[in-house]
Image (cartoon, rainbow, N blue to C red):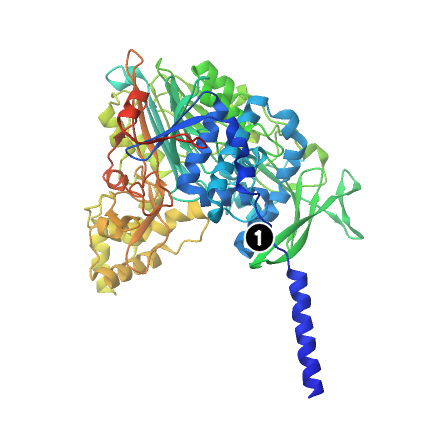
Amino acid sequence: MKIVKWGGAIVLLALIGVGVWLWDPIGSNPPPGELAAEAANYDVEIIRDNWGVPHIYGARDEDVAFGVAYAHAEDDYETIQEVVAATRGILARYKGAGAAPTDYIVGLLGVWDTIDARYEADIPPKVKAIAEGYAAGLNLYASENPDVTWAGLAPFEGEDVVAGFIFKTPFFYGLDGTLMELFGDDRQAEIALDPSARREAFHAVPKGQPERGSNAFAVSPERSGDETTRLVINSHQPMTGPVAWYEAQLVSEEGLDITGGLFPGTPLILHGFNRHLGWANTVNKPDLADIYRLEVNPENAGQYRLDGEWRDFEEETVTIRVGLWGPFAFTAKRPLKHSAHGPVIEADHGTYAIRYAGRGEIRQLEQYYRLNKAETLEDFLDAMAVNALPSINYIYADKTGDIAFVHNGQYPDRIDGWDWEKDLPGDRSDLIWEGYRPFPDVPKLINPASGFVYNSNNTPYSATDGADNLTKEEFPLSMGLQENETNRSLRVQELTDGEKPITRERLLAIKFDLAYAENSQAEEVIAAVLAHDWSDEPELEEAAAHLAEWDRQMDRNNRHAALAGLTILREISSQFDGSTPPDPLVAFREAVSWLNEHYGRIDPEWGEVNRLVRGETSLPIDGGPDTLRAIYPAEIRDDGTLHASAGDTWIALVEWDEAGRQDAWVIHQYGSATLDEGSPHYADQAPLFADMKWRRALIERAAVEANAERIYRPGKVD
């Protein structure tokens, strides 16, 4: 009995010891009064229109930023908190082990090292005031809603806002994919050859980097047929989450007057339109990150070879707190190393350093502020010349009829001759580039002869349907410009001719086009299926005959699109999500089986399968992956439907007539209430969106007030 008692005591003591070791309470937030104190320094009026969209009015720009935070928190506070926690590198404390890689990357990229070194000295006072005004708006909301504020996350700070840009902007050109590939268990990549000694360097497409999508179009008054300048803003984003569009209008007495989309955690419009001009963004994929293979000293793991000598790594430790349950967390410490090249990644297959565009950059919010306040093409180009945003295409239009395309990027100032898309030898300091090419070197096409510019995530060498496109010969290979076409860009080329007027009706027909182009990836998959001899399998032979009648359209009533769409879906999606698609014959066979299982036929209408689902709302929707009307499902579901999860989201059509008068139409895929399922604005725009229809943007204050649903001043007694 004594042995049993002692054994139980030992177990109890061990459990207590483990509990003490894991005891790591997350902390509490300041009391509401303390959180709300800064709100007294801001005064803003928010008018929610009949669609729930916030129109935010303030005397100062920072007042408006305060209102943006408060309004957005009302609609999507949970996502904003997730963004802040991820940016701080503490997401695993709230979300568990799955978030630990994110926290590690925050440390690896030196996000807060950049904040510590540059925030006070390099952020202009007005930009800092905007960031801090946004933080104050979040703190006011937190003070009023303590039960939904994550423990220990408040107070929010201006540094959180700026750090969010530092952390996220490099991911838009695929840095996250590059990092994940390096962290992978099995990596195969060629190392670049020295271009001297008669060895050739050539450029290859990076592997395993998921791409993103978007469309953008601008038409000059000379091409429009009615002397009207038009801009279509059509970014393809996830329909929910940290990079889902939220619509707002921002108006201050200091000249801010802009409508558009922003992400959780951002105080200004990321793309949209003011009274004078507008711009649309699409993701571009130039080669902006370089990987160096390091030789580690076999006798001292803390050193690497550079220029014939062993150099010491810069070393530190990142602490990751992984939440378990309640006040308990596991604390993991992971080493961080840096070489002269940049952050170091140690993997089973080698030791690498990475140098990338955006490293140490802190002026992103400053550039967006200048873009928001721009009134002319010159203002816009001056803002772009800040060159703080590491990537992203811009399609521009203004009330004077100017249109432009900018293949924006922080292009590394590399030496020519090397194949920079391959791994580089890490022992040569001459391959460690410093700084970026100046903005005049950035590819841009301003007022082309055809009066039309576009981008659909394709090469900058196809930006207009006229004869004055940019050419490959104008730019050095070391810039790493992309050379791809997408189905969407190929369709634009099929639908335009450089001469025929692009009227409003024709422009919208292009934007909402539902077809796959000749020689597209979709056509290649279908051709492979049809080239196979299915005569030994009558059911599949009949299905192939049905597939052969497909007209390459993805309209909701199409009875061939379901079989075709399911056959091509994973092949097309693989270029966006980095997955490995099945062989076309396997994909076809599985599509036939899946349709028969769920519908008892291979020819249901596409709209039966392809759905826009939001709460209790479920609607048929046209389009598919990589069509101009872009709709991407999350997965092939067990219930026999595809639910749209990305693609077309917030869209705008902006017009300026010959006299410069502005009009605009907009639509959101769901509605302004991102998380509140009980709100009338949770899915109120979904029927219009599914039918490819618009609502008129309310720009003038009188129109906003005439359609007001609610008017209030956060932090003030009504």
Coordinates of residue 237 in the picture (x, y in percent): 40, 40
Left or right? Give the position of 375 relative to 105: left
Q: Is residue 97 above or below residue 220?
A: below
Instruction: Residue 173: tell me if it is visible.
Output: no
| Quadrant housing residue 258 | top left
Is 637 in front, or is 446?
637
Q: Quadrant of the N terminus?
A: bottom right
Residue at mark 1: 93
Q: Is residue 109 above or below residue 661?
A: below
Q: Residue at x 25, y 61 (%)?
A: 598
Left or right? Give the position of 233 relative to 68: left
Coordinates of residue 139 in the picture (x, y in percent): 51, 37
Coordinates of residue 327 in the picture (x, y in percent): 59, 58
Left or right? Give the position of 653 relative to 558: right
| Quadrant housing residue 309 | top right
**Amino acid, disc 1:** Arg
Q: Residue at x 40, y 27 (%)?
A: 45
